Amino acid sequence: MMLQIAVCMKQVPALNEGKMDEGMGTLIRKDIPPVINVYDLTALETALRLKEEYGGKVTVFSMGPESAESLLREAFAMGADRSVLLTGPEFAGADAVATAYALSQAITARGPFDLILCGRQTTDGDTAQVGGAIAQFMEIPSIYWVSRIHAVTPASCTVTALTAKGHASCRIDFPCLLTVERELAVPRIPGLGAKIAAKKRQPEILTLQELPDRDSSHYGRPGSGTRVIKIFSPREPAPAAAVSMKGKEAAAYILEWLDEQTEGGIR
Amino acid sequence: MKQKRILIYGETDGVGLSAVTRELIGKSRALAAKSGLEYSLILIHDQAENCRDELSAYGLSRIYIWKDAGDFRADRYADLLADTIRREDPDILLVGGSPEGRSLAPRVAAIFRTGITADCTELALDTENRLIQTRPAFGGNIMAHILTPNRRPQIATVRPGVMPPADRTEYCPSPEWILCRNTARTSAIRLLGIEPADAAEEIDTCSLLLAVGGGLKDKEDLEMFRELAALLGAGLAGSRVLVERGFLPPEAQIGLSGHSVRPRKLITFGISGSLQFRAGIRQAQKILAVNIDPEAEIFRAAHTAICGDLYEIVPELIGQLKEK
């Protein structure tokens, strides 16, 4: 079997200790080193394991500034066969749907692929919407929240995915798109040798001119339906004064608190 | 000018309407009361008849019922929803932020090449009746107001449990029922079976949640929390330190590197409350914190704070609950 697997990855600001403005409750964005979105590492790890088990090739796609090349070198170090960076001023300011459209065009330009894997969401936007929109633009089926991939045949795979009713077992025909949960696979840490070798490899650069649809109004900010009109910090409740209580008293107090109605009359 | 319209994507929980569907109806009704827009609903479900009485009591204008569509599959359901959107021509499409809704909505946004705002925690209308969508980003550290100014429909998925559900009204105009035919679209997905999920895996959806932290001395002590959670029908989660000690699986971790939870009520026991942990509980509606240290940082995020020993309080709670 020769599975052609595409993995979508994004560079996001790292969220490490002490990188947030305590007073504002917001991120101090400058000086935050970019990292690979952790959920995307699971997608890449999943692709690499499928390749190792069934044979095939793994191609990583990312959209971003040229500095995102470092992300793609990390993907090479983990074992990706090819990597493609979609870059150019036309793609700046894209919302989830415009990002998905650009990625779907890039994947089409370098395809065909049997399987497209995405992380469940990014840690910056948190939308979990890009994968589904990519699948729709490519007119292929999609399954979200995949926690296991069982059997793979040349024509389909069987997966376990979270639904409202529980864990559904589904068979999905290729080509298809899956978004994967972190529990699916723990990403490998590349060795020093692999890292050094990856430094010498160049990701392929893809620009608007090489896409099937070269109309720049379909991409970036002009191609985006949404506009962020305001950003603000969420409020924490006013700090509560801690009341000292012994076991019995505290237990009775907690049970009373549990019986109180929450806002909106729902419990 | 055409009256502005909201279309709600309805879901069922096997018995009746799902909670988030009632919340979307409640929000639509509140928006309609202020602006005079009308709201309708689509339900893709074979047993839609079960919901007929309830759906008649919410002041909905039209109800689109799709039968014979089979179980949820994102590709097929997106096509059916798109058909209804073409017919109803709504300005706004509201979808529950359920596993199903969040996998369906982006496909529909792509079909219409419109804007989508995921996981909204608040919705309002501006002076031109455009939808102001509020959503958290960066793990809840930033909130944003988002508009879809020029494209239609404006699509929002809404976080379950944050908006009040609709109440039934005795006297309201009867909705128009529109039965739609499934025009034999196939899906490339075949459902083979479903296993119910464990409660422990649902920490980001349960309405009452207990969270335990470094104040726990031994792994065995988790047993009393499991018992308490079972008695209360609550989920059980923990802070990073418990996951690192191997007491709890990573799926049960709250915080920036774990889950962002949104229960209606959260009780924390023995959690010191780092900034990273607090970022994961910002969406909880009411927080009660128990910690032995009166200066614990968790009290900065709590609505109610008890300074006490969890090893005294939890057995007492279990005892009092059993007496009830």
Image: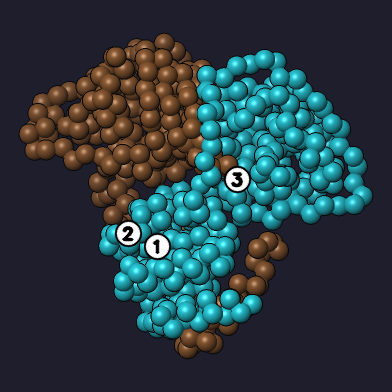
Chain colours: A brown, B cyan
Q: Are marks 2 and 3 on the same chain?
A: yes
Q: Which residue is drawn at 43% across and 61% down?
A: B237
The mark that comes first in sequence, 1 or 2, is 1
Residue B238's tag is 1
**Where is residue A208 drawn, in percent x and y?**
37, 17
Mark nearer the N terminus (1 vs 3): 3
Q: Position of residue B82 (x, y in %)?
A: 66, 24
Residue at screen point 61% across, 54% down: B161
How many angstroms separate mark 2 from mark 3 (CA)?
Answer: 30 Å
Left/right placement of residue B59 relative to residue B43 reads: right
Between marks 1 and 2, how big is the CA–CA gap? Answer: 7 Å
In the displayed structure, does residue B218 sit left or right of residue B30?
left
* Residue bearing the label numbered 3: B158
In the picture, residue A209 is in which quadrant? top left
- Quadrant containing the N terminus of chain A is top left
Please determine whether, in this image, residue B129 is positioned above or below residue A159: below
Q: Identify the chain of the residue marked 1, using the numbered disc in the image.
A: B
Image coordinates for residue A39, horizontal then vertical, percent? 35, 40
Amino acid type at image mark 1: Gly
Residue under numbered circle 2: B243
- The answer for which chain carries disc 2 is B
Question: Marks 1 and 3: which is nearer the front?
Answer: 1
Q: Residues within 10 Å of mark 1 (few under 14, many from 20)?
A: many
Instruction: Name above or below for residue A107 compared with residue B138.
Output: above
